[in-house]
Amino acid sequence: MLALAAPAVARAQSLTEQYQATANQIIQAALSDSDAWNRLAEMTDRFGNRISGSPALEHALDWMLARMRADGLDSVWSEPVMVPHWVRGEESADLVEPRPMPLAMVGLGGSIATPPGGITAPVMVVTSFEELTRRAADARGRIVLFDVPFTTYGETVQYRLNGAVAAARAGAVASLIRSVSSGSMRNPHTGVMYYDSTVRRIPHAAISVEDAEMIHRMVDRGQRVVVRLVMHAHMAPDAPSRNVVAELVGRERPDEVVVMGGHTDSWDVGAGAMDDGGGIVVAWQALRLLQRLGLRPRRTIRVVGWVNEENGGRGGLAYRDATAPAGQRHVLAIESDDGVFRPTGVGFSGTDSARAIVRRIARLLAPIGADSVTAGGGGADVEPLGDLGVPTMSPDVDGTRYFWYHHSAADTVDKLDPREMDECVALMAVMAYVVADMPDRLPAGQPSAPSGGR
């Protein structure tokens, strides 16, 4: 077995020597300007938040297509996608007892509305689903508040996703969550939530970390806490939208594709700079950089701005369905959706033999300290390709501040550093170019172990 693997390992090791000079050229060029940050600032300043179904999203997509064509990329087009259209409407939450006070709240994506006059009810605070189950008799006719401190996103987000179902099952009239956030300046965080067809639907919203803790303290003191919740949210009919696509066509094997990108939609709070305007702009800038340097790989490198990642994932599914009939073979799918902060390496989901090659390619990124390879990489938009056996990847970044701003009004371009964005451009460009250009394609197949990721 080892004898069979040795030639492949030797070829992979030679990649470092073969591509070091080109990688250094890419890195130097990527760090020489702030085009990525400036372009992201222009997009977010001009169009703001870009929730699926909104005019702002469609105007931003028009702008992207026009700019990509002006960049002179080989091919630029859009693919139609029908997307969900949730409309927030007016909303508010107010403390009624023990004293009047407006709460910092935001409705969760997909929630139904309250009755026109709102819901006014006593609040019951719980810190887990298990506590709610134990105290279910106390929840009837109340607003349940899940005051659950942030541990990991995967754990804590369960209260946003499934809190309304659990609260309704216990007889609550509405549910609130402490925002899924690792830090807060009284900025509530939105995000998608789910209903269960077997349980009555109730309104579901988030309040700030500070307000959730205050209400919890009041309840612990034995005070009666009453909240009035008003939400005018509704689901409109599905709306037409698009994936945005641009590519650098391969010189020898154009039907073999390395795809990279991010999602163009955002939530309807903040400007969607970090999540995920930065991801698509960094991939776009990486492609522009390779074109400007005259680096045309053997295979095609394609950038996709997937639509509707936040509340449906329709863009990733539509992309998979559009490319499969064309007979295109995806060699690698890279998604940037964890913020474009300082990169430390990549997460990778694929076979052990493919991971061994990626580890050696990653050595080329040592000059920017981004040469690590961890298990588990990809994203919601490339997951449909991963399910077909395509290796998937995502930049690993310093996520210390990510959940301070995630899905909140604080997600604005000033939170991102131009130098760190340029380093993300370098990572995406080097990894995409080498995988697209190396003589042998990256081995495909299902990962040997389940991948991680958010």
Image (cartoon, rainbow, N blue to C red):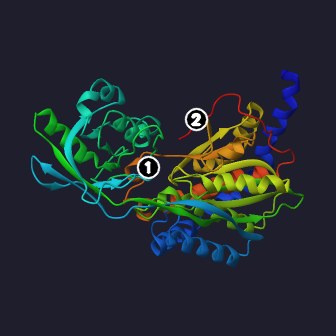
Q: Amino acid at mark 1?
A: Tyr
Q: Residue at x 20, y 38 (%)?
A: 216
Q: Which residue is mark 2?
A: 452
Q: Quadrant of the N terminus?
A: top right
Q: Which one is nearer the viewer's eye here, 306 or 68?
A: 306
Q: Which one is nearer the viewer's eye here, 413 or 192?
A: 192
Q: Which one is nearer the viewer's eye here, 417 or 311?
A: 311
Q: Which mark is residue 93?
A: none
Q: Based on the displayed image, in which of its 4 quarters is residue 125 positioned?
A: top left
Q: Residue at x 53, y 63 (%)?
A: 237
Q: Secondary structure at mark 1?
A: helix
Q: Nearer the viewer, mark 2 or mark 1?
A: 2
Q: Amino acid at mark 2?
A: Gly
**Residue 24, x across and y down, in percent:** 69, 55
Quick check: marks 2 and 1 in contact, CB under 8 Å?
Answer: no
**Residue 88, x across and y down, in percent:** 39, 61
Q: Which one is nearer the viewer's eye here, 64 or 230?
A: 230
Q: Which residue is mark 1?
A: 402
The mark total stands at 2
Left or right: 65 in relation to 270? right
Vertical side of 288 occupied by 340: above or below: above
